[in-house]
Image (cartoon, helix red, strand yellow):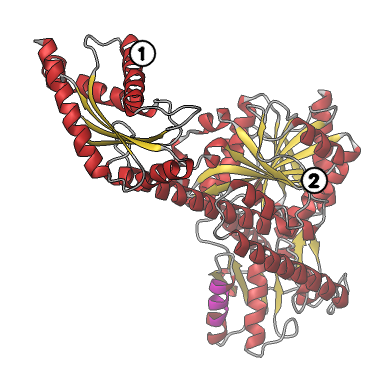
Amino acid sequence: MLNGFKIIGVCISRLESTRHFEFISKLNALAVKQGYRLFIYHTHSDLYNDSLRCKGEKSIFDIINYGIIDVGLIFEEAFSSKAVVEELIEGFNKKNVPAIVVGNIHENAISYTFDYESGFEQVVRHVIEHHKIKNNIVFIAGRKGDDYSNKRLDIFKKVCSEHGITDNEVRIYYGDYWYGPTKAAIREVITSRKLPKAVICANDSMAIAAMEEFVAHGIHIPNDIIVTGFDGIPASMTCNPPLTTCKCSFDKVAISVMNGIENLIKGEAVEKINYIEFKTDVRASCGCKKDYRDFTIGDLLRKSEERTENFLFTDYSLHALTEKLTFVSDEKEFIKILQEYDFYDMSVILQESALDETKAPNMTDLLSPEEKAKESKYLLFDTEKKDRDYPVKIEPGKYVLQEDLERIIDFGNPLIVSAISALGERFGVLLCYFDVDQISYNRILQYSNFITNSLINWRNNRYMKYVAKTNERMSNHDYMTDLYNRKGFFNRLPVVVERARNHGERLLVANFDVNGLKVINDKYGHEAGDFAIASVGKILLELPYEVMACGRFGGDEFAFCTSVKSTNKFVFSTKQIESKFMEEVEAALAKANASSQQPFKISASVGVVISEVRNFDFNKSYRIADVKMYRMKLRNRGKRK
C-alpha cells in the first residue's frame, strides 16, 4: 500500500499490442474505482530468447518494489518464456506477496486461465456440425511438438472421431503460427488438385494467411472454401472477408481478476483455478454472416490514419532531436536539449555509475543486481518539473522522488516502468504515466528507444572525451609523481613566462635532485625509493605559487619554474628571492618527513636561478641551476661523511 492506495504490481510486455492494451485499460478503470493503483513492470518484447536485448529488458523485474505491492499480477500471454513467468511467481512468493497469473495454470499462483480447449472445440463443431462438413477438411496446426498446437490438434481429431470422419477425410499441415509457413502449406494444398471444403486453423494469423493465398490463386472465400481461425486478434475483424474465430472478453477477464484481488485483500477464499470463457465469433469467412463487421471501414481508416500520422510525426521530431544530441557530451546541455521536446508524463532515472564519465558504457556489468539496487540513483529529468537543477539524487533504495511518486499516484494513471539498457545491462529506468489511450501507449517504445539510444550516444561521447583527456594527460605527465614529464613541462612553460611578462615579474628556475636515493633503494627497497621520489614531487606541487611548471625529467631529477614578484613596495634582491624559496622548500620537506612514517629522511639538493623575462632562455638558466644543485649535493655528501 502507498499513500492510502492498494498497489497491484503488473508484469506485462508490449503495451502497444491491442490485446495487452485492452486488458490494462479495463483493469485500470476497475482498479481506480476500487482504490487501487497499477505499477506496471514492462518489457518491449515477449522475452522470446536469451539475447542481450531481452536480458536488459528483463532486468526491470529486478527492481520490483515488493514492499509496497499488495498483489502481483502476471499477464502470461505477454511472455514467450515460461521460465520468466516461473521466476516472477517465485519472486512474489518469496516476499509473501500473493501472485495471480492470467494465462496458464500454475501450482504456486492463483490462476485465471483461458479455456482455449473449450473455445477451440466450439469453432471445430461450428464447421462440422453447423456447416455439416464431414469430409475433405484441412487442419493447419501450429508448431510440431508445441503444447498448444498438440492440444488443438487433439480436439480436432476428437470432434472428427465423434462424427465418423476418418483420417482419410482430413489433411494435417503445420503453419508454425505464422504467415510464411502457412502460405507454403496452402500452396501445397492447391497443387494437390483436391481443394478442401474447409480449412480450420489453430490461430488467426494462419487463417488470414490461408485466405490471402487462396484468393491470390483465384479461390473465393467462403463460396469455394470456408476458413476459420482462433484467438480473436484485431486483424481477424479487418481482413477480407472478416474471419470466423473465437475470443474472450477482456471486460469479463478484468472483472473476474479484480473480484479475486478484492477477496484476497479482504482475506476471503479465492478459487485456485479460474477459467475464462472463450466464445465463437461468427463472421463471413465461414459463410454465416455475409461480410458482417461490427465497425465501419471509415472509422477504422480514420483511426489507422491517426495512429500512423502520430507515429510519423513523433518519429520525425525525435530524429530532429537526435541530430541535436549527436555530439553532446556535457550533462547540463544534454538535459536542456531533452527538455526542448514536448515530452509529457515521463521521467528518466539513471544509475550513479551511468553518470560517471570514467566508466566505459559497456562496463556497467561489473555491478550485480544487488549492487545496482544499493547504488544511488539520479533523476535525469522529469517532464512536469523542468525548473529543477538536474540531475537530482534520489533516496537510496528508491527509483523515484517521494514528491513525484505522490503526484503520480494521485494522478490515477498506471505507472509504467521500463528498463533503459545496453548490451544486456540496465543502467537506468524510464517511467511513464500517460493517460490510458492507445496512441499514448504506442509512444512508449518510441520514447524508450530514443532515450536509450541518446543516452548511449551521450555516454560514449563523454567517455571518449574523458579518454582523450586522459591520454593527453598521460602523454604530458609522469605516472609516479603526477608532475609534468619533459614534454608536458615545455608545453606548460610558456604560460609561466607569459604570467611573468604580464605582471612585470621575474622567473625562478630550480633544479631538484633527491639525496641518497641509491642508499634508500639498496637499504629499504625500490618501493621506498619510489616513495621518496613521489614525496619530492608532491612537495613541488604544494609550493605556494599561483602559476608554475613542475616536471620530473627522469630518475630523481626535477625541474621547476615559476614567476616571482620583483616589486611589492620595495625591490627584492635575487639573493632574497632565492633564500625565501629555499626556506619554503625546507619547510615543505620537514612537513613531509614529519608525516611520512618512513625509517629514512627525505631531502633534496636544489639549485636556484633568478632570470629576467627579457631574453629568457630556460635551458641556459637550468644548466646554471644544475651546477648550483650539484655543488649543494657535494656539500651534503661532505656533511654526511
Q: Tell me residue 373's x, y (percent).
A: 57, 30
What residue is shown with label 1?
Answer: 591
Secondary structure at badge 1 equals helix
Would residue 101 appear left or right of 550 to someone viewing this image? Answer: right
- The part of the image, by quadrant, that contains residue 449 is bottom right
In the rendered image, the residue lying farthest to the left is: 641
- Closer to the camera, 570 or 473? 570
- Closer to the camera, 516 or 217? 516
In this rendering, the label closer to the viewer, 2 or 1: 1
Does residue 571 appear anywhere in the picture? yes
Does residue 83 appear anywhere in the picture? no
Dominant SS of magenta comes to helix
- The circle on residue 542 is none
- The part of the image, by quadrant, that contains residue 138 is bottom right
Instruction: Estimate how packed mark 2 is, as few (under 14), some (14 to 19) or many (20 or more) residues with alpha carbons within 10 Å.
Output: few
Query: Which part of the image, by quadrant, shows the N terminus?
Result: top right
Q: Tell me residue 202's x, y (percent).
A: 64, 64
| Stretch in magenta | 180-187
Query: Which part of the image, by quadrant, shows the C terminus?
Result: top left
Q: Amino acid at mark 2?
A: Glu
Nearest to N terminus: mark 2 or mark 1: 2
Q: CA distance from mark 2 to mark 1?
A: 55 Å
Q: Tell me residue 205's x, y (percent).
A: 65, 68
What residue is shown with label 2?
Answer: 384
